[in-house]
Each structure stands twice: as C-alpha cells, then as structure tokens.
Image: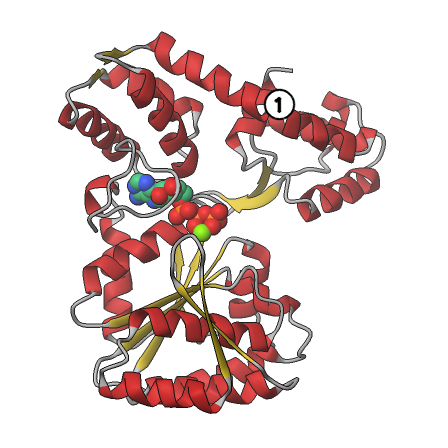
C-alpha cells in the first residue's frame, strides 16, 4: 500500500492498517475459518465495514493465500459473474505462473475481449458467450483454481445479488461446485440481512449450514475513541476525549459516518478540534444531503412519511404494531403500519436489526437522514 489518503480518516477505500481501527477479533475468526477451510458468511448493516474488513484480511494473508475479491452488485446473470471473476483473477494471478498460463489459455479458448479502464488502466475481461455458457465456464474456472499450488480465497461481496439472477437455482448450482473444491475457500458478504440469512440459514436452501456466520457489529467505543485521538496526534493536531465522545455519539458509532465526520473535522481543524468544529461540520453534512432527503419525502406517501418520522424519534422500534406506539403517534391501524413498513424496507430507508439479546427492532441506518429527521 503506497498511496496515501487525503486525511487519516478515509471514507472510500482501504489504505492499509494504519488507517484501520481494530477488528482484531474478526480478523482472527476469519483467519481461523480459512485455515480450517471453512467458508464464512459475513453480514452487517450497510456501511458498517464489511468491504474494509475483507481488504484488511487480504492484507494480512497475502503471503500465504492467493486472494481474489469481487463485488457482484452490478452483475445481472451468470455470464456477468464469470466476467467479474475472470477480471479479478487476471488482476491477481500473474500470467507467467503455471496456473496463470493455464487460466490464460482458458480465457483465449473462450474468445476473450480484453479492455482497459480509461481511468485506472485496470484490465477488464469479457467473453462472447452463448446464453447459459457462463454457467459451465464458472465451474471450469473454479476447478482450475482448485489446482493452484497456493490455497485460494475468493471473497464475493454483495453476494445477495445472485438471488436476482434470471437463472433459476443459481444458489444450488454454485453450492454444488463449491462443495467439490478442496483448495478454495469463500467469504460471502452482504448487507441485505434478510436475504443473506435466508440464503444461508434456511433449511430448505442449498447453502444451509455450509458456512460459519460472522456478524459485524459496531467497533468498540473506547477503541474507536483512542484510535481517533491517535490519528489526530500523529498528524500534529489535537482533539480531546470529550469531543471524540460527542462525535461518536452523534454518529451512533456507525463506521462510515464516524469516518466521514472525522474526515471533515480533521480537514478544517488547524490545531485543536472543538465541539464547535464538529457541530459546524455535522450541520454542513446535513445541508449537503438535504436535497436527497427532500426527494425521499416526495417519494413517500403521507403515512409512510409519518411512520419514518416516528421511527426516527424513537430510534429503535421493537414492536411496531404495539398499541402504545400506535397511540403515541396517532396511527390508524396496524395493517396500515405493516404496509408502510414493507414499502420503507423495500426502499431501504429503514431496516430490521438485532440487539445484543437477539431481539429485532426497526431503525433508520442512514445516520445523516436520521439526524435530519430528528431535528424536524
Ligand atoms: N475498522 C475500520 N477502521 C476505519 N475505517 C473503516 C473501518 N471499517 C470500515 N472503514 C471505512 O468505513 C467506510 C465504510 O466501510 P465499508 O465500505 O467497508 O462498509 P460496507 O459494510 O462494505 O458498506 P456497504 O454495505 O455500503 O458495502 C469505508 O470508507 C471504510 O474505509
Ligand atoms: Mg461494501
């Protein structure tokens, strides 16, 4: 890692361990899993740090493992998945190695088109495939990787995307191939918790019990606090424990929002960041997003808007159809609420989360939207 982020609080990609806070236990668990050839399902709400954790893991195991990362959010079918996997392999495994040559020959046999991203100059592979051919070729490619002299880790980010492929039974197909591999271990990561849970813990689904689960929670308060103070001090700026505490409270300790606010505060702060500094930056962030929030309001019906405001006021809503909740906010009926919940979930404006005791509640994951709603 030789590039440096503009501030010690990156909000986009992984810049190496100096910019990464904690996750020691999670890394230990992941390393244990892969060493025992156990695949992992990594689940967390959006922007909690799943992708960052995978990158951090890759940093730690890079010597012993060939590790391949793909984000399949933009894929729409198995042919796309093959393209995506092939592109990642091409970037990771050098052509001059034995396995590299084999893979290249395979690519050539499939009438490969190689293009380069105009900005990053990164190679991009695509094949001229007949419908359904991707399916067979994914199998061939994975079996080829299984022959590699190094063990191979394949991390598939946004894995829930396979459930929207038009090919029926993609999960069953992949599961069958994966079961045959001896040298390849997987991490399946996703933020759509209900889909991920259904894929991996529903007894009637092919992936049932095939992986270990890792739920990524918030970073420990004290650990994050220390980390932030250190990042400031290492760059000859100051911030007190109390001010960091205020920042962590305002951002609900949600990784991306902590990073975002710290990034802004660090940028504007000359010597010492104060309560005023972070409050100004927080206000600015809300202002920048306001147009988006107005669009949300236009997109929603009156009752959906009313419900989301009530959820914001409550923070966490455990029983959304409870009489007390209905009366407090003057809702009509519980069936009306359930309909609104359904649409708000579909629009990903609210989500279901679990607390430490395993109880489910509804909340708004977008901290900026939540803070904006609270202030209405
Ligand atoms: N442990 C960490 N320490 C510091 N920054 C982190 C940490 N984990 C994640 N980040 C940063 O927080 C931001 C959000 O994390 P990331 O993109 O990994 O989340 P995600 O769960 O993959 O989100 P999404 O669901 O949107 O894909 C990124 O900028 C990332 O660099
Ligand atoms: Mg991600």
Dot 1: element: helix
Q: Is residue 194 left or right of residue 47?
A: right
Res. 339 visible in picture: yes
Front residue of this view, candidates 35 and 352? 35
Q: Position of residue 234 (x, y in %)?
A: 14, 27
Q: In terms of image quarters, where does ligand 1 lie?
A: top left
Q: Is residue 270 left or right of residue 136?
A: left
**Which residue is rendered at x = 22% and y = 32% of the image?**
227
Residue projecting furthest to the top: 276
**Which residue is rendered at x = 22% and y = 80% of the image?**
150
Q: Position of residue 246 (x, y in %)?
A: 36, 18
Measured along the vertical axis of the image, is residue 87 above or below residue 52?
below
Q: Position of residue 8 (x, y in %)?
A: 26, 33
**Which residue is rendered at x = 24% and y = 40% of the image?**
4
**Which residue is rendered at x = 32% and y = 90% of the image?**
102
> Mark 1 near ligand 1 (CB under 8 Å)?
no
Front residue of this view, candidates 318 and 22? 22
Q: Is residue 212 left or right of residue 354?
A: left
Res. 181 visible in picture: no
């Amino acid at each position: 890692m030789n590039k440096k982020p503009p501030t010690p609080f990156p909000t986009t990609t992984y810049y190496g361990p100096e910019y990464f806070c904690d996750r020691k236990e999670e890394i230990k668990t992941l390393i244990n899993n892969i060493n025992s050839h156990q695949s992992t399902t990594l689940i967390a709400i959006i922007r909690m740090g799943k992708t960052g954790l995978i990158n951090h893991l890759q940093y730690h195991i890079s010597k012993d493992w060939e590790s391949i990362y793909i984000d399949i959010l933009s894929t729409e079918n198995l042919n796309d998945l093959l393209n995506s996997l092939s592109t990642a392999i091409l970037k990771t495994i050098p052509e001059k190695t034995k396995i590299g040559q084999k893979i290249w020959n395979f690519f050539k046999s499939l009438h490969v088109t190689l293009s380069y991203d105009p900005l990053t100059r990164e190679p991009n592979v695509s094949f001229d495939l007949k419908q359904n051919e991707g399916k067979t070729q994914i199998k061939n490619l994975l079996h080829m990787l299984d022959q590699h002299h190094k063990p191979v880790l394949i991390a598939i980010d946004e894995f829930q995307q396979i459930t929207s492929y038009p090919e029926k039974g993609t999960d069953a197909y992949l599961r069958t191939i994966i079961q045959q591999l001896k040298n390849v271990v997987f991490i399946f990561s996703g933020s759509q918790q209900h889909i991920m849970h259904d894929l991996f813990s529903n007894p009637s689904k092919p992936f049932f019990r095939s992986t270990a689960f890792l739920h990524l929670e918030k970073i420990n308060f004290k650990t994050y606090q220390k980390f932030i103070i250190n990042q400031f001090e290492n760059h000859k700026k100051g911030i007190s424990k109390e001010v960091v505490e205020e920042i962590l409270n305002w951002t609900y300790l949600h990784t991306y929002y902590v990073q975002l606010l710290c990034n802004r505060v660090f940028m504007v702060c000359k010597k010492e960041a104060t309560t005023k500094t972070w409050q100004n930056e927080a206000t600015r962030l809300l202002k920048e997003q306001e147009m988006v929030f107005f669009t949300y309001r236009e997109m929603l019906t009156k009752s959906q808007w009313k419900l989301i405001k009530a959820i914001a006021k409550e923070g966490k809503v455990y029983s959304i159809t409870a009489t007390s909740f209905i009366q407090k906010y003057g809702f009509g009926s519980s069936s009306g609420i359930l309909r609104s919940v359904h649409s708000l979930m579909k629009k990903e404006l609210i989500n279901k989360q679990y607390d430490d005791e395993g109880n489910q509640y509804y909340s708004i994951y977008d901290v900026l939207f939540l803070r904006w709603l609270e202030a209405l």
